[in-house]
Image: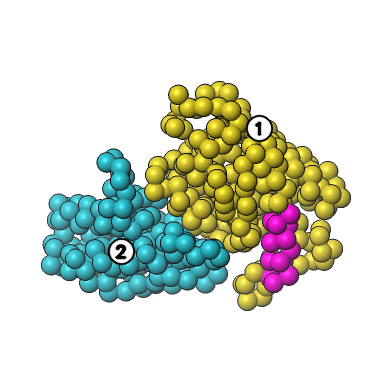
């Protein structure tokens, strides 16, 4: 199928997938932090690789990314992206301790890294189980991978599977925020299905490609 | 670096040429390889941001030739010669090819950094272009900028700051 020619209904379906997945993940995060977390209506965008990187602040912008591969019938990549400051707020809230993301040797703090991976695990699990229920497609997450580095470097690695086929990625982008001006936690979920996965997802939902 | 020239920017799966006093740069190399080919005396350099190793593994007819090591290097050499560089004088510096994530199910795609490095070296060897310095592998992203005036390649990473090769 040609992802350049998605109908409005198909876009709605993808938006709903982002909604359900992130909604579930936000509920998990909210109960973990015991405070209210909001999410925005997901946006569905078809972007080139260079545009995709601009979406998250440019190739050199340093981000905290928790990434996992989705395996099964509709493989893809999910990113949960935060700024360094937001990741630190999240770590400090969970540990009730004033820990910085990087230690004095400029390495990622071990405890901080393990907290972020655990958060990634919980968010991932809830995101994917919602998607799985909705699409009736078995989706198995890999373990979460944490990287704090340049956006360009991180994002491209997740897109490689796709880039063998096409030069564009269809992103389902959902922003979450805690609405707390002093200690705001903003995050962005990206689900980037591999090229062959769109047909599988639509097929499972009863849309057949003419 | 110098303040006189402008910076020519190269995106992902892209390539371009710069002459002194300009510099040429690409940002956020992960598993991608940045290959600089230059003529030191003529002070002209080309930079390719290579994303994948081999265009021949792709069955489609229409491909982005700037994306693959084999096709991108070939085009870059042609463009350099067209702009006055001399074949026998060409030299190369390469950087990138990191592994950003340690995926457990070690399938081939995940070792793409290593394969990009190998493919870049192979095509440079085919054109008999010597690689005089390199900074490849590891698990950090890199931003690189080449200065044709001095033939120096500046490499910046998040953890190690700036180095020159």
Quadrant in which the C terminus of chain A is drawn: top left
Q: Label 1 neighbourhood size at 10 Å, few (<14), some (14-19), many (20+)?
A: some
- Secondary structure, mark 1, is helix
Mark 2 chain: B
Q: Give the side of residue B82 with respect to residue A141, left or right.
A: left
Camera-nearest residue between B32 and B5: B32
The magenta stretch spans residue A112: yes
Q: Which mark is residue A63?
A: none
User: Is A72 one of the magenta-colored residues?
Assistant: no
Tell me the SS state at disc 2. Answer: helix
Q: From the image, tell me which residue sits under label 2.
A: B119
Q: Which chain is cyan?
A: B
Magenta portion: prevailing SS class: helix
Position above or below: B54 against B41: above
- Magenta-drawn segment: A109-122
Lateral position of residue A186 relative to residue B54, left or right:
right
Does label 1 lie on the same chain as label 2?
no
Q: Position of residue B102 (x, y in %)?
A: 54, 66
Q: What is the tally of numbered marks visible in this picture?
A: 2
| Residue beneath the point at 58% across and 28% down | A206
Residue plotted at (63% across, 54% down): A141
User: In the current view of this chain or complex, which residue is farthest to the bottom?
Assistant: A105
Say if residue A162 shows up in the picture: yes
Task: Identify the residue shown where x is 40% and y is 67%.
Answer: B114
In the image, A202 versus A120, the foreground residue is A202
The yellow-tinted chain is: A
Give the quadrant of residue B143: bottom left
Residue B32 pos. (x, y %):
41, 59
Q: Position of residue A120 (x, y in %)?
A: 69, 56
- The residue wearing badge 1 is A16
Q: CA distance from mark 2 to mark 1?
A: 41 Å
Circle 2/circle 1 CB separation < 8 Å:
no
């Amino acid at each position: 199928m040609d992802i350049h020619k998605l109908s409005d209904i198909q876009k709605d379906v993808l938006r709903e997938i982002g909604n359900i997945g992130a909604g579930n993940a936000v509920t998990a995060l909210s109960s973990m932090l015991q405070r209210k977390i909001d999410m925005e209506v997901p946006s569905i965008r078809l972007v080139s690789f260079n545009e995709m990187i601009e979406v998250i602040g440019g190739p050199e912008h340093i981000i905290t990314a928790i990434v996992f591969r989705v395996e099964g019938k509709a493989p893809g990549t999910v990113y949960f992206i935060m700024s360094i400051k937001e990741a630190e707020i999240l770590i400090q809230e969970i540990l009730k301790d004033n820990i910085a993301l990087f230690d004095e040797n400029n390495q990622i703090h071990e405890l901080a890294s393990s907290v972020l991976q655990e958060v990634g695990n919980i968010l991932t699990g809830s995101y994917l189980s919602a998607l799985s229920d909705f699409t009736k497609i078995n989706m198995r997450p890999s373990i979460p991978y944490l990287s704090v580095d340049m956006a360009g470097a991180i994002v491209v690695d997740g897109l490689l599977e796709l880039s063998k086929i096409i030069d564009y990625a269809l992103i389902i982008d959902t922003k979450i925020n805690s609405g707390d001006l002093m200690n705001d936690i903003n995050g962005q979920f990206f689900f980037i299905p591999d090229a062959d996965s769109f047909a599988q997802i639509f097929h499972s939902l009863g849309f057949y490609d003419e | 670096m110098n303040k006189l020239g402008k910076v020519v920017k190269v995106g992902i799966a892209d390539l371009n040429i710069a002459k002194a006093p300009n510099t040429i740069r690409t940002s956020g190399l992960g598993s991608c390889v940045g290959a600089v080919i230059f003529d030191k005396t003529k002070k002209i350099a080309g930079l390719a941001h290579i994303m994948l190793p081999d265009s021949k593994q792709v069955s489609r007819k229409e491909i982005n030739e700037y994306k693959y090591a084999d096709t991108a290097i070939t085009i870059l050499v042609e463009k350099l010669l067209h702009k006055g560089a001399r074949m026998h004088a060409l030299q190369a510096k390469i950087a990138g090819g990191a592994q950003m994530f340690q995926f457990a199910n070690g399938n081939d795609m995940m070792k793409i950094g290593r394969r990009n490095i190998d493919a870049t070296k192979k095509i440079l060897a085919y054109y008999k272009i010597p690689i005089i310095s390199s900074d490849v592998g590891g698990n950090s992203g890199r931003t690189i900028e080449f200065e044709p005036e001095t033939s120096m390649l500046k490499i910046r990473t998040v953890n190690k700051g700036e180095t020159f090769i």
